[in-house]
Every structure is written in structure tokens, then in C-alpha cells.
Amino acid sequence: MDRNINHSDMSDVLRDMTYGLMDNFRRAILTCDLNKKLYHQPLWKHIYHAMYWFDYWCCTPQNYLGADFHRDNLHSLDMESDSIVTKEELLNYFEGIKAKTTEYLECLPEDKLNEAAENCDNKSRFECILGQFRHVSFHLGNVNAVTIEATGEWPYVSAREKDFTHDLFE
């Protein structure tokens, strides 16, 4: 299907799809066994890793929020942690990221999307956002695969903001 999209539609599409992507954090937290291990790390750590970097890059490093519970290397999948992060902590961090990202995207003018963002390795704001689609989808896909194998149920994957109302599983 070939359709022409004007600039204001593109900003709306970017926001809508980013809000859908973010909802997948909530869904993964609510559907997986957070302490089940994947590649020597509990699933909560895989989710936190993706959330940490989404928080850092999606709205540019100068807007990084950070989790109240963060400790050195907690976000690293290469290092084991003595800490345990709870469902409530992950959900609270998600809500903070969601609020920050919503405010950022609602105030981000379309003409700024292709400008290099400060402290972002010469990447545009659009590249920072789009890069997180790849990163988050990869990690949450792995988490969902473990959930599917363990439960026999397929977690629903949000594509757009309106998908928030869909059940947690297909």
C-alpha cells in the first residue's frame, strides 16, 4: 500500500508507535516470571537493561531519568548482580519513563527530529528513538519467548498506543 504522509502525520505515527513500544515493558513485567533465568541472568535484569538504555537514549542522555534502585552495573547483562529488582520497582520505573517520554515527544517539534542531539554521538533525535525500537524489541522478544515456553501462552505485543487496552495474552 502506497500512501503519502505529511510531516504532522509522521510525528503522530512516531508518538503512537513509541507509546505502543513502551507498553510492551509493562506487559513483559506483568506476564513473565521475573526470576526465571535466560543466559545466566534473571528476566527482570533483561527488562531492566532494556528500560535503562531506553531511558538513556530515547529522549537523549541529558534527559536521562534513572531508576531509584539503580546500582553500579545493575543494567549490565555481562555481570551478575547480588540485587533483586521487584515487579513494583520495575513498574514504578516504567511509569517514570513513560511520563518523561510522553512529555518529550509531545513537545518535540518535527523540524528537530533530524537534528543531531546533544551528547548522542552525532545521532539525530529520530535515530535515538528508532534505535530503541530495535533494542527494546530484541530484549523483550527474548523475555516473551521464555514466557511462551514456560506458560504455553503468547504475550500480546503492543504496536500502537491504543493496544494498551488489549489483554495481556493473545
Image (spheres, rainbow, N blue to C red):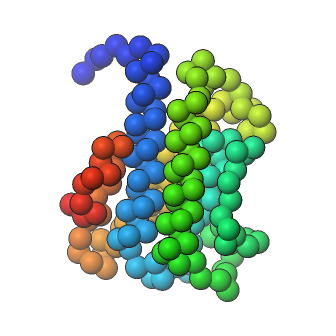
Q: Residue at x 24, y 60 (%)?
A: 167
Q: Residue at x 78, y 39 (%)?
A: 119
- Depth check: 28 or 107 in front? 107
Count of numbered marks: 0
Q: Provide residue 41's location: percent of width, then percent of height.
A: 56, 78
Work out whether residue 31 or residue 164 is closer to the camera in this orientation and state it. 164
Relative to 58, say whether 51 is above or below. below
Residue drawn where x is 46% and y is 51% of the image: 22
Residue 28 position by quadrant? bottom left
In x, y percent, where is residue 105? 54, 35
Does the image show residue 126? Answer: yes
What is the x, y in percent for residue 76? 67, 68
Task: Give the quarter of the figure containing the N terminus.
Answer: top left
Q: Is residue 121 visible?
A: no
At 62% from the left and 70% from the top, the residue drawn is: 77
Q: Is residue 72 above or below residue 14?
A: below
Quarter holding residue 156:
bottom left
- In this rendering, position of residue 116 left or right of residue 58: right
